[in-house]
Amino acid sequence: MAAGASAGGVAGGCRLLLLGLLAGLGRAAAAAPPGGMLYPRDTPSRERKELGGLWSFRADFSPGRDAGFAQRWYRRPLRQTGPVIDMPVPSSFNDITQDPSLENYIGWVWYEKEVLLPLRWLQGNLNTRVVLRFGSAHYYSIVWVNGVQVVEHEGGHLPFEADISSIVQGSPGIPCRITVALNNTLTPHTLPPGSIQYMNDKTRYPKNYFVQNIRFDFFNYAGIHRPVVLYTTPSVYIDDITVTTTSSESVAMVQYQVSVVGSTLYSLSLSLRDQEGKVVATGDGPAGELKVLNPNLWWPYLMHENPGYRYSLEVKMQAQVNGALLEDVYTLPVGIRTVHVTSTQFLINGRPFYFHGVNKHEDADIRGKGLDWPLVVKDFNLLRWLGANSFRTSHYPYAEEIMDLCDAYGIVVIDECPGVGIKMLESFGNKSLQHHLVVMEELIRRDKNRPSVVMWSVANEPASELPPAAYYFKTVIAHTKALDPSRPVTFVTDANYALDRGAPYVDVICVNSYFSWYHDPGHLEVIPLQLTTQFENWYKTYQKPIIQSEYGADSVPGLHSDPPLMFSEEYQKAMLREYHSVFDKKRKEYVIGELIWNFADFMTNQGTTRVLGNKKGVFTRQRQPKSAAFVLRERYWKIANESSCLPPLIKSHSLFL
């Protein structure tokens, strides 16, 4: 809660808070920016400089949240505009200080970092390009370099960048001042949606008092959540690479497309290397295919003794510019695998794959949603200890660094966009739809080459029973398939099977249900009948494979009860076992997966049903196992051993004891 813009109703408040003076500053593009979004890597032709660490930070507590624009804070060092504090990047700003007004702050905050660039980047010979890239910032971002606006981006969880060469080159020795204005306000047309509600009863609330309403059950952390980097390329450079693969028992084909920006006169050569560095295929030109004999396929964890196998595709571009030879090199990891969906199965490389995994959140103490390497590695070690082979990126795209490890470890991913909490009728209109299409473009542009990503999810628990949902999801799913025909598309539903207007357009039914928790709370005995009926109704209606995409119960660590009572560790275990008994029957037919809600406890808004967050994790927020974790571990390893051809060492899972 926070005092904010002058009263004027929900719409007026949202408009002032989110847009402020943007009309005079320019508006974000209505479509995804053209071009690629390759992850910055050091190569023989490219360098990068990470800008993580402490940034200067200031929240705009002015009544209209617009002082920063009115006073043009971006024109001079932020410390000269008023009090600033240190803020770590990447992190959420909410939990860093002892200031309760920052914990729940809504509106514009300002970040600043001054950095000296290497002299070799600034020679001004026009053959080096300097790019500023943000892994993500939540939610609406405007960026200036030395007082010049360079980029504006709507949406969290996805990267954006700007070419800043013309601003920084020719000024060696002068610090490069990067200023970011960031607004976390959610409106009916953002993803995720939200609304601002003004409390106009002056006998109960202070003047200009408002709250941010959301329709999702996790804390709306905000800040610069992922790495900020500066990187270079030649002025003629490899802008994008798209790879798709097909395979048989002895031959694989790697289809590629490469786009080059800066010149139409260039040459391209490609080399595909195995993990020993041996060249297994070569090609040239902007499009073609590479033939790989006896390929090492990319297999999921616990489905092969060598999961996550990736080749390295080295792309080399050469061009003549003003008499000088420019060369750009980029290396892309490539996994060779296929995905196919039937009416009863999900096939990876032609073999049935059963999702036994988790839903997660990017969430932890203090850092919020900020990328943190020790936490990331710990989570992957816990996933493998658990015997989980998959997760859904509930409910937004995760950091690229996390996705890299999924590729490397063979963890299968259902890649979900931030389409959570789409409940209001106005969130199904054309304005929301156009933004949703852009978000899918940005997500697919980022993750299209990842072998771990086997399916796109365009939403979680929308009000898909509403009449406009039919056209809305038909359009979003068709657009997603047009962008990437190689992967199935779904959204996750909690609607009644007979009323869901989006389900006809998905390839896989993903359904959430909480029998004996939100429905018939405390009555474990109803689960077998209700869950069986759920599956049979969905399959009879659509003849599509089904994933139980969420199920679970809250448990307070250390709270015990026998017989099991709600919120005890025993109740959580008992609920899981009731669900599992039905899964074991239906996975012989058309159920292709089960994803527990949730991997770990996570923070939510305060409320009478939430005691320091959602407690449905099988691990605590500090990543310690509850009793349910051992139930899940025993089950997942049993399923893996039944369906795999793993060597005894891995089958015994002694690697992760």
Image: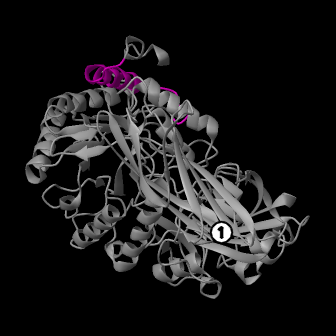
111 relative to 352, above or below: below
Q: Quadrant of residue 93?
A: bottom right
- For label 1, the residue is 162
Q: Quadrant of residue 229?
A: bottom right
Q: Amino acid at mark 1?
A: Ala
Considering depth in this image, is 16 or 459 the residue closer to the camera?
Answer: 459
Can residue 514 be seen? Answer: no
Q: Quadrant of residue 344?
A: top left
- Residue farthest to the bottom, as pictured: 24
Residue drawn at (22%, 69%) of the image:
470
Classified by dominant secondary structure, the portion drawn in magenta counts as helix
Can residue 288 be seen? Answer: yes
127 relative to 87, above or below: below
Considering depth in this image, is 343 or 221 the residue closer to the camera?
Answer: 343
- Position of residue 76 measured from the top left corner of the image (x, y, whole percent): 84, 74
User: Is 134 positioned to the left or the right of 571 in the image?
Assistant: right
Q: Which residues are magenta?
A: 621-646
